[in-house]
Structure formats: C-alpha cells, structure tokens
Image: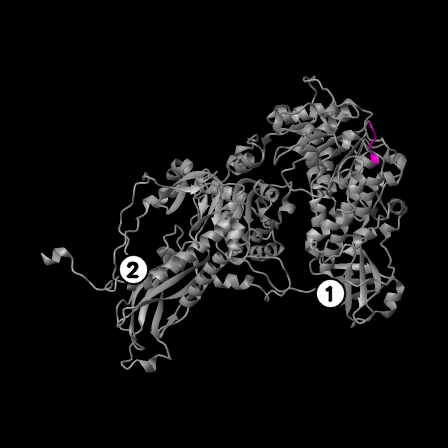
Amino acid sequence: MTHEVQLYYCSICDRDVGAPGWETHIASPQHARHASKPQPQRQPDAYGGSQVKKSPESPNIPPLGRLAPRGSTYCGLCTVEVDRHLWARHVGSRGHQNRVDDVRRTLDEAEKDKNGLAVTGTLDIGYIHPQAAERGVIRYIFVRPSLESRLLFESGESDAVLVQAYFASIRAGRSYRSGFSVKCADIHKPISVTRPATIQYNFQRHFLGRYGDHIEMIFQNVHSKERFMIRRRVDAIVGDEDEHDKLKASAPYVQQAKPERQPETCVVEGVPPPSLKNRDYQVTISRLPQAPVPHYIAAIPPGATFRQQLAQVQTFHPTYFDINTYTTHFRNLLWFEELMMEKDLGRYDMMDVALSRFNNYFYLTIPGLAEKRPSILVGDRILVQKKDSPSGHWYEGHVHVLRQLEVILGFHASFGSSWDANQRYNVRFKLNRSTLRRQHQGLDFPLREQRILFPTPRDLRDMPRQFSSMPLYNTLIGNNSRQLEAVMLITHQPPGSAPFIVFGPPGTGKTITIVESILQVLRNYPRSSILACAPTNSAADLLAERLATSLPTHELFRMYGYSRSATDVSPKLRDYTYVRNGSFSLPPLTRLREFQVVVSTSVASSMLAAIGMPLGHFSHIFVDEAGQGLETETLIPVKTMGTSRTNVILSGDPKQLGPIVRSGVARYFGLETSYLERLMNREAYDIDKYNGLRVSCSVVKLTKNFRCHDAILKFSNDRFYNGDLIPAGSSSLIDTYLEWQFLPKPDFPVIFHAVSGKDDREASSPSFFNVDEVLQVKSYIQKLKSDPHIRTTDHDIGVITPYHAQCQKLRTALRPVAESVKVGSVEEFQGQERKVIIISTVRSSKQFLEYDLHHTLGFVANPRRFNVAVTRAQALLIVIGDPQVLGLDPLWRSFLNYVDCQGGWVGPEIPWDSSVPVESVTRYDVAVRQAAELDMNEFARRVEKLALEQIEDPDANVDRPWRREME
C-alpha cells in the first residue's frame, strides 16, 4: 500500500513544508523575516542580471500543494522520489552515478577559461578586518582575450561579449546569502587586451568567519549568438590577519606512522620510589590477582575488522548475561579494554630523545605531560633503550617524581654506568595494571546477591510513607521535598535492602543529599560504619570536605592511594589523612576500624580488603557520581566489603557523562554502561512508568535545579528529563546577564553564534583546532570583561571544547587578556559550574559530497557530552559553531532550532526552517548531501539552459519593441 502525504510549497522561503506544519511554518520568525524582505521580481538590469523590486509580501500566502510518498527522499540530481529504505541502493546505482559524473564534468568545464577568454583579478580577497568587512569592500574581476587567442583576433578584440554576471547563491534563490554581490559589469562591450570586461563586486559581512561563493559569467558570441559560461570561486576571510598568523598551524599536518611494538625479550628492572616500598603497599599489591590476558583473547588479530573480532569473541563469550555468567562476562570485557589501553598508550612512545642525569636519577622530558597525554603517576614504569641497541633489550625506569613537563626516573645501577649525555634513547610507556587488577579482584569475591547485581521489584522492601521529622545538618533540605524524601528513605532503609538510587540531574544537589544522608545514618544509628566512594579523587575530595564540616578527625578518614601527591590534596583534608615516610598510607587496622566514615575512590577502596578489613564492617556503602565509573570499578567496595546485610546507595545521573571505554568490542558488550545506568534500566527503577515519582523505596529523582537560568536549562530539561526540573537558582546570580548589551534578545541569556570557519591540524597531532572560533571566543571574553555595568572575572568564565588542540590554541589566545579562564574538555567540567560558559564546537568541514559528514562531528554528537556542556552555565551560555555541520545531528539541530526560535541566533542566518520539527530518525547528513547535489543540479540546468535557448528561440537575444511603442 502506498502512503501519501500532502506537501505545501512556500514561494517566499522556496521550500516544501508538510501540510501538518504549514500553519507553524508561516507563523515562524524565519518565514516572517523572508516575507519582510523585498521579493525577487526578475527585470533586466543594466548589467544583464536582475534588479530586485521593493515589494515585500504578506507572510499569509496561500499554499501550493502536491503529493509526495510518505517515507520517501527526493533526489535532486535525478529529480525522483526514492523510498528511504532504498536510498543507499539509489545513490549507488549506475544512473545516479552517471548523473553525478555528468554534473561534475559540467562543473569542471565551467571552471576553465574558454573560447579565447581568460579571467583574472581578485578571486581570493584574503583577510578583511572586521570593521572593513562591516562597511563593505569592493574588488574587481577582469576578462581579457587569452594569450593563445590574441593572434586569432585581427581587430585585437574577442568575438564574445559579457551579457550577464551574478553570484550563484543569489541565482539559486537560496535563503542563505554569502555576502557577495555584483555591483556593476561591462555588459555588451567589446573585450580586448587594452579594454577588458570589468566586473565590480562587493563583499559585506558583519561577523568573523570564512565566506565563499561562485560568480557565474555568461558570454555570447557576437556572430553565432551562442552563449557559454565561465565560473570562478570567490573567497574572503573576515578576521585580523595578525591574530590568525599567531595561531595558525606551526607545520602542515603529517600523520605519524608509529612502528609496531616489538616484544620485550630482556628488561632490566628499575628502582621503585620509596612509597612503593612500604609494607602496606607491598601487602595490598601482593594480594591482587595477576589476571593476565588469556591467550584466546590476546590471539585475536589486532588488524582484524570489528565484525571479524566480534565473530571470534562470540565463540567463547557467554551468550546470556545473568548472575551465573556475571564474572566471566566482565573479565572478558576488562581484558578487551586492557589490550586497547596498551595499544593507545603506544601512541605516546618516543624515538630518538635525550635523557639528562643528576646523581642517580634521570630526567625525561614528555611534551604532553601537563595535559595528561599520557597520564602518568608516581610508581609507573617507563622503558628506555639506547637508540641503536637490540630491539628487545630495555631498561625499566620507575617514576619517582612528576614535574610539569618531565619525570624523574630510577633505573638499575647498570643503566647509569652505560649512560652517555650524547646518547639518544627510545622510550616506551607501560600500562599500570594495578587498577585493572583491583577490578579483577572485585570480581573474585564471592558476593553474588541477586538484590545487588540483578534487583527485581520482589527485592524492594516496604517502607512507611510518613516519617517523623528529624533535625537536619543542612536546613535548606527541609525546603526541598525530594531531597528530604531521599534522606529519610536512605536513613531508615532496613539492612540488606536493594540498592537505593539518588537520581540527580544537573545542579539538583545530589552530593548535598548524600552528605546529609551519611550524617543522618550516623546520628540515628551510632554503631553504623560507612564507606563513601566516588570514581575520581576530585569527587571523593568534595565528599570528604563537606563531611569534614560536621565530623572530627577521629571519626572521618580520607584514604588515598600511595601514588597520590600531597600537593594535590586540599589543606582542609590533610588532618583527615595518614602519612608515613612522606607518602600517604594506612593507619594500623585497629585504628582504621575506629573511624565511622572512610572516604576513598572506588578503586582505592580495594586496599581495605587487602590489609584485612573484615567483610561486613561497613553497614552502608555510598558511591557518589556512580554514573561515571565502570561497573567493575563501582562494585569494588561492594564486592570486597559487602555482605547480605550491607546497604548500597548510589547517586548520579545516567544522562550525563558515563565511563570512558576505549575498546569497541567492550563497548559493544556493555562495558560503557555504568552500574547506575544498568540498574535504572531495570523494572525496579523504572521512573518513567510512575511519572517521575519514586518507586517504592528504590529511587528518588531530584527536581529542583539550583544552578541554571530557565532559558539555559529548558532544552536539556525537556530533552533528557521529561520537563521535570524546576529552576530554583538565586535570581541575583542566574539573572546577571539578562540586560547584557550583546544579547541578541534581552532576557534570553543563550546565544548561538554561527561561524563558518576552518578546522585544521598541525605537525603530527591528529587533534583539530579552528582559529576562527578561537578568535570569536576571545572576542566574547573581552566584551564580558570590559563591560562597565556587569563585573565578570576570569574565574566566572569557562570555555569547553572537545579537542585538545583547540584547548591549546584558546589558552594561547587568551593568555594576554584572560589567562585564568579555565579551558578544557567536557570531562574536565563534569560536576563544575561557571557564571558564563562558552562552547567552541570546532568542526567546520565542507566536503559535503566526498565524506560521510555524520562522522565529522566526532564526539560532539554525544548526547551526554552535550547535556553536561550546556548545563554547566549558570547565567549565560554562548555556543560557537558551524550550523551546517552541527545541523547534521538531530540533537544539535533541535538545540539550534530552540535558540533561533527564541531569538538567540547571531551570525549568518540559520540555513533551514527552524520551525520544522526535527525527526530523530532522519539522516540530516543525507539531507545536506541532497541540498548540495540540488545546487549542483541547478547549476547544470543553468548551463544546459544556455544551449536550449539557442535551439528553442534563435531570436531570443533580439530586442523587440513593445506594442505600445508602435501605437
């Protein structure tokens, strides 16, 4: 059965609109803008182009209808509707490819000089200072007889004249304008060497970025009346050339081919740092399983395709995931991940470098060390060999000290005896397996309780709906019903309950809720003991600092791993730690058992089991930010310390950043799904089923957002949280920029600034940067800091960008004007907030026909990263990017529509109708390719029309008098 849908054609916007969306379309701001502009009415002008008559139209135009098959896609090249399911087959068909080849040949031919004419003049304007671009600049193009043809023209004149000149973007009738326009041209005048045909064109734009168009010049042979076209690309860059030069690529990008790692046949052991020699460390390490990668996994060829790898994995990996296969499932995934981690670490290996020496220590400079590229800790191993030594012979160096750009290594004495200051060395970084071994240790522990690993509604305990009031440590919680409900439920949970989840969207105070819950458990059950964990040291420190305001040093202990540097620890927490021989350590077990609360990272908590802390010692195990850690990390404290009576409490948000997983195979089998997210996908934690209300005693969703202005929060709230979040921030903070002079719409503190830039790479770094966006970020920061009415400091501003190279360029550009502004990736801003957040999305690829543009978005298209990035802002959010690229992703396209409809758009117009709802299943990269093909096809038709005019009407170019003149 064929399904059909009514389509309406809007002659003002030059596009088809579905019948259900017609009323929405004609009421949209974009339609109104187009209607208010003069509509093109073709009249011959003095230059052979077309004048625009000043006649704005009423936006309430009648629709022109047509029928199109539902679920079809229009091919602009072949002018046919194609079923979406057959689209891939269609674009690969011989007929479509022939049409593509024909159009490309037409394009190539049009770019050439022809028929004895040559085009010269300014085609690449280059850099234009923003002030000059705003005023407009004029440039000239000249058409002369070519060198080869001059001998053929006896009169010195060409036998062709210029009859029209126009820019393709205007001729095509597109809503997007390039900023180029023809001012005047020498129409119908003889063309000679001394009197070339001159075309004067103007470029005018108000915004930084790169602009381009094609000028199409139509010529006619004065004898045969035959017409032909010459087409040229014209480009301009709006920006300060000096600033661009300071930030441009230091060298062209050349992909470095790393030699394949050869086996290590002989390794001379190095000298570990003192912190790794203490007895507690030796005990904890010795009790960890080795868990080497088994042969059947290591034997999978590294060069195999993903599909081939999966086929081999399925021969030994469990078919089902349940309590009986749980350990085997996660062991395999950890081994897949380890192999990829080792491979990725090899990218940082260095060749032909120097080693300096002081006494018995050796200094190695590592260029990316400050940015944790690679990430190195005290105690890690680095292998070194002389440049000309046998490939398998290495010396092992242990990291003793970390500095900004170098590490200090300890080697075996034999290395020092052969060291030479002029010798060059090869360097290999070794994976520290201790974190992986701790996860394998957790899997070894026998705790296999259904209520912990696979809870069902039957595991939920009945809880009273009303609780007696309790005095609160944080009295503000009394005004937040959801936070108070979570605290009450956690406090009164009976032993052995199913894991409890505090679902905390951005800025809702989940860590405050966890801290209050811990304190209330201690107050109501004085004999309880609590282990509080988080996936990172920074998150664990935040927990400890907030607990330290209410707990003395004899009740709270902050446990650190041995590699942690004392300089990285807040002075507020130093009295809550234990140091021996200058390194963090553990107090005697008898003393450790006296603490009521122990705070640690999830991974470091395995040290408790290693030194003999008995199972069941902790009545409650809390894991904050549980959505960020691997399940095997999050469950280390639960598996190594828990019993059938231990209560587990998780807090986090599965809609924000999850764990980082490098292996595609491990991701495929679910390692990227956190324990928190996996539980929330189970029936016992199905919030949506109950309209966002708590389900029995398993989960509470916090809904008051104390961070963001409503305009900043609204999109994420509607998209990820069913609109449940309630803005509750302090108006004195979140309303700071409502009257900022650079807001395109007052009272809407969200800006999308469209920049058509150029993404680039340099030297051997594969990371992208975009100088145009860097300078736009800098411009906004200068405007913020110089505003006399609103005080904004460096610490009020955060800049988020997905690429390391862009971070470096931004820091370089901001150093003279705002050195203390934090610039980093989304991951670096998780859990943080700033009054102002500026996001630079970087990618600006324009290779619409040659590449699958969906991939050019990189991880900008990750919904969780998007959610975290836009919800870091408290009072002002500025997003800078190329809408042509971002619009390929349905999520970003929806966000851009939201900003445009609310009046927050800055820069060149949005290149689509922002009132049309976005379909999540639509391939917008296909739509962009279709639009580009349509442009190509329209150009080809313009060329074809030149020939057809001669056939259909041989007198088409003869001037005829109007009937009125004959009266």
Q: How is the image coloured?
A: one colour
Quadrant of the image occupied by residue 527: top right
Residue 554 counted in the magenta span: no
Q: Residues within 10 Å of mark 1 (few under 14, many from 20)?
A: few
**Relative image position of residue 874 (x, y in whole percent):** 56, 39
In terms of depth relative to the viewer, which is nearer, 369 or 97?
97
Disc 1 secondary structure class: loop
Which is nearer the eye, 734 or 856? 856
Q: Quadrant of the C terminus?
A: bottom left
Vertical arrangement, residue 49 with respect to residue 11, above or below: below
Find residue 7 and report its horizontal and vertical position in percent.
40, 41
To which residue does mark 1 refer? 259
Where is residue 671 drawn, in percent x and y?
A: 72, 43
Which is more toward the observer, 671 or 317? 317
How far is the residue under mark 1 from the one under mark 2? 60 Å
Instruction: Pick whichever of labels 1 and 2 is earlier in the sequence.
Output: 2
Query: Could you tell me which residue is drawn at 55 percent across and 61 percent down?
Result: 247
Q: Magenta segment, which residues?
A: 640-644
Residue type highlighted by circle 1:
Pro
Q: Is residue 643 magenta?
A: yes
Image quadrant assignment for residue 23 = top left
| Mark 2, secondary structure of its residue | loop
Depth check: 961 or 842 in front?
961
Q: Which residue type does callout 2 highlight?
A: Gly
Label drawn at residue 49: 2
